[in-house]
Image (spheres, rainbow, N blue to C red):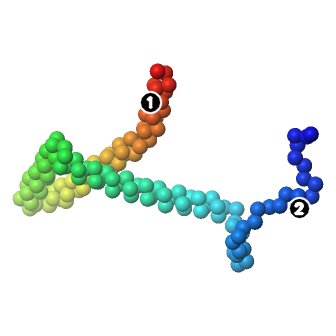
């Protein structure tokens, strides 16, 4: 008996058929269309993932504001300092008209930086899960 499979005619190996009717008005995809579709899908998934992370990090930080005394104290101090800076900028607006805008920009960008750093750390934590799991399994196998 031979280990090779031979096909004597095209009818010997029927192709799978679909129960869906063929769309006669649909053109076959162009060579780059599949790659473009893949990139669009990847973009959509990345956006959804990033939105999930943004929402999750926001929820974590809100919980930390109520459950973590150190974080809550820091947030309160930052808020108090910002209020003092805004009051001072208001008082000095005649002398330094750009000061209020500068303080507002500083607050906006420090908040953005804080959020971005939290998201970066969260994403890295997700990536680290696989590595930690591998290390843990290796440790268990050694025992």
User: Around disc 2, counting alpha carbons within 10 Å, would you say few (fewer than 14), some (14 to 19), or many (20 or more)?
Assistant: few
Residue at x 25% of width, y 50% of height: 61
Q: Is residue 49 left or right of residue 19?
A: left
Residue at x 73% of width, y 77% of height: 24
Q: Where is residue 122 in the image (x, y as percent from the top left)?
A: 36, 45
For residue 139, above or below residue 32? above
Q: Is mark 1 on a helix, strand or loop?
A: helix
In the depicted view, which residue is nearer to us: 82 or 6?
Answer: 6
Name the outermost residue toward the bottom.
Answer: 25
Q: In which quarter of the image is residue 18?
A: bottom right
For residue 111, above or below residue 131? below
Pointers 1 and 2 in contact (C-beta within 8 Å): no
Q: Is mark 2 on a helix, strand or loop?
A: helix
Q: Position of residue 105 (x, y in %)?
A: 23, 56
Q: Where is residue 17 in the image (x, y as percent from the top left)?
A: 75, 66
Q: Is residue 2 left or right of residue 64?
A: right
Q: Can residue 109 be seen in this view?
A: no
Residue bearing the label numbered 1: 136
Residue bearing the label numbered 2: 11
In the depicted view, which residue is nearer to us: 3 or 124?
Answer: 3
Residue at x 69% of width, y 67% of height: 29
- Which quadrant of the rendered structure holds the N terminus? top right
Between discs 1 and 2, the one toward the N terminus:
2
In the depicted view, which residue is nearer to us: 120 or 71?
Answer: 71
User: Around disc 1, counting alpha carbons within 10 Å, would you say few (fewer than 14), some (14 to 19), or many (20 or more)?
Assistant: few
For residue 44, above or below residue 131? below
Q: Position of residue 32 (x, y in %)?
A: 66, 61
């Amino acid at each position: 008996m031979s280990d090779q499979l031979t096909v004597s005619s095209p009818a010997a190996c029927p192709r799978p058929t679909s129960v869906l009717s063929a769309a006669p008005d649909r053109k076959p995809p162009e060579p780059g269309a599949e790659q473009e579709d893949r990139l669009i899908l990847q973009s959509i998934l990345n956006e959804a993932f990033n939105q999930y992370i943004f929402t999750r990090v926001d929820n974590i930080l809100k919980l930390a504001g109520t459950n973590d005394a150190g974080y809550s104290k820091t947030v309160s101090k930052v808020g108090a300092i910002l209020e003092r800076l805004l009051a001072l900028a208001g008082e000095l607006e005649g002398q330094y008209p750009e000061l209020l805008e500068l303080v507002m920009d500083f607050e906006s960008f420090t908040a953005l930086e804080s959020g971005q750093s939290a998201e970066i750390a969260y994403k890295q934590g997700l990536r680290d899960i696989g590595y930690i799991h591998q290390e843990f399994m290796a440790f268990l196998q050694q025992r």
